[in-house]
Image: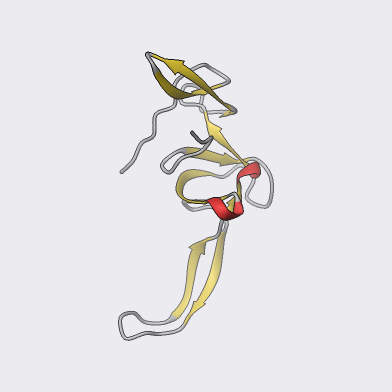
Amino acid sequence: MQRLQVGDRVIVVRGDDKGQAGKVLRLVKSKNSVVIEGVNRVKRHMKATPQKPGGILDVEAPVHVSNVMLIDPESGKPTRVRHEVRDGKKVRVAARSGAAIEVTRE
């Protein structure tokens, strides 16, 4: 079980995008990074293909996991993550409030 999963709400605690929050779109396990919706936007120059036109696109770049923290579902503040066994299942728990963390996938 991991500290972060796709669909989690996180906040950036260090770096140029400090204070920005968003939903985890993708995990890059090989680089210990996450891609967060609307955070760390960079310009990418894309060459045109028969399927799509080229141009300069705004895309989200990965952020290292050490620079983000999960948002507590009760208080809305950054929190660390613990793992507990509740009702025979291993669940992620917010260290700040003790609330179980549910993943919202859309």
Who's the residue at 52% across and 39% down the image? 10
Q: Quadrant of the C terminus?
A: top left
Query: Quadrant of the rendered structure where residue 30 is?
Result: bottom right
Figure check: 74 above or below 36: above
> Depth check: 35 or 57 in front?
35
Marks counted in the figure total 0
Who's the residue at 55% across and 70% down the image? 43
Figure check: 44 above or below 48: above
Query: Which percent across, then down, holds residue 60?
Result: 51, 59
Who's the residue at 65% across and 44% down the image? 67
Query: Which percent across, then down, holds residue 70?
Result: 54, 34
> Depth check: 66 or 89 in front?
89
Query: Which percent across, then down, holds residue 77?
Result: 56, 28
Residue that lies at the very extreme toward the right in this rendered image: 15
Figure check: 36 above or below 10: below
Query: Quadrant of the rendered structure where residue 40 is?
Result: bottom right
Residue that lies at the very extreme toward the front in this rendered image: 88
Figure check: 97 above or below 48: above
